[in-house]
Amino acid sequence: QVQLAESGGGLVQAGGSLRLSCAASGRTFSTYSMAWFRQAPGKEREFVANIRWNGGSTNYADSVKGRFTISRDNAKNTLYLQMNSLKPEDTSVYYCATGRPGLMATAPSRYDYWGQGTQVTVSS
């Protein structure tokens, strides 16, 4: 059984930075792609970024491109999301997710395993 646990959320002022982490266990982390999603109150869960198993390919939502960076440390079984130049509209619960090997989808329904989420609040 795959287990994912996010951390690193918090309250930050607009223009600030946060780094989220996602600790994975239960299967060979280094062989699976990973993704970050977010969900604001009353809104659909939306894609943020994903990364291939070896870090060789990444994709970003247009809304975060140039501000957020997804990365991974396979030796530590950990996924990261560095968030810079944060805006109030980035306020959401952030989730990490994974699915079948090679998955690089942007639709939440394609992912099988989810963490519990971590709250990010950006004040103006």
Image (cartoon, rainbow, N blue to C red):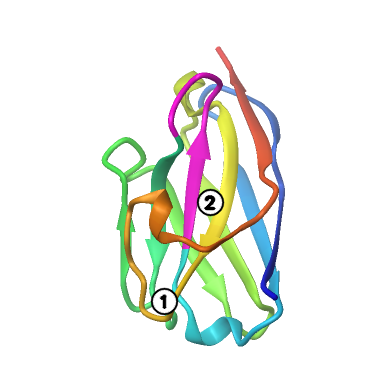
Q: Secondary structure at mark 2?
A: strand
Drawn side of residue 7 relative to residue 113, left or right: right
Q: Nearer the viewer, residue 80 or 102?
A: 102
| Residue sitting at x 70%, y 48% | 116
Question: At 46% across and 37% down in the image, what residue appears?
Answer: 45
In the image, residue 27 lies at what x, y percent?
A: 64, 84
Q: What residue do we see at 39% from left, 75% from top?
A: 52
Which circle marks residue 82 in the picture?
Answer: 2
On screen, 67 above or below 101? above
In this rendering, the answer to whether 24 lies above or below 49 is below
**In screen coordinates, is 77 left or right of 59?**
right
Depth order, front residue of 7/13: 7
* Magenta region includes residue 40: yes
Q: Are marks 1 and 2 in contact (CB under 8 Å)?
A: no
Other residues around mark 1 within 10 Å, as few (<14) / some (14–19) / many (≥20): some
Residue designated by label 1: 55
Q: Quadrant of residue 121?
A: top right
Please state which of the two labelled residues, at mark 1 or mark 2, is closer to the viewer. Answer: 1
Name the outermost residue toward the top: 124
Residue 56 vs 51, above or below: the answer is: below
Q: Which residues are magenta?
A: 35-44
Q: Position of residue 44 (x, y in %)?
A: 43, 31
- The amino acid on which the numbered mark 2 sits, given as a three-letter code, is Gln
Tell whether position 84 is magenta: no
Q: Amino acid at mark 1?
A: Gly
Decide if residue 17 is in sight here: no
Q: Is residue 30 above or below residue 115?
A: below
For the N terminus, the quadrant is: bottom right
Quarter of the image for residue 100 reads: bottom left
Closer to the camera in the image, 110 or 18: 110
Write the residue at 36% across / 79% down.
102
Q: Residues within 10 Å of mark 2 (few under 14, many from 20)?
A: some
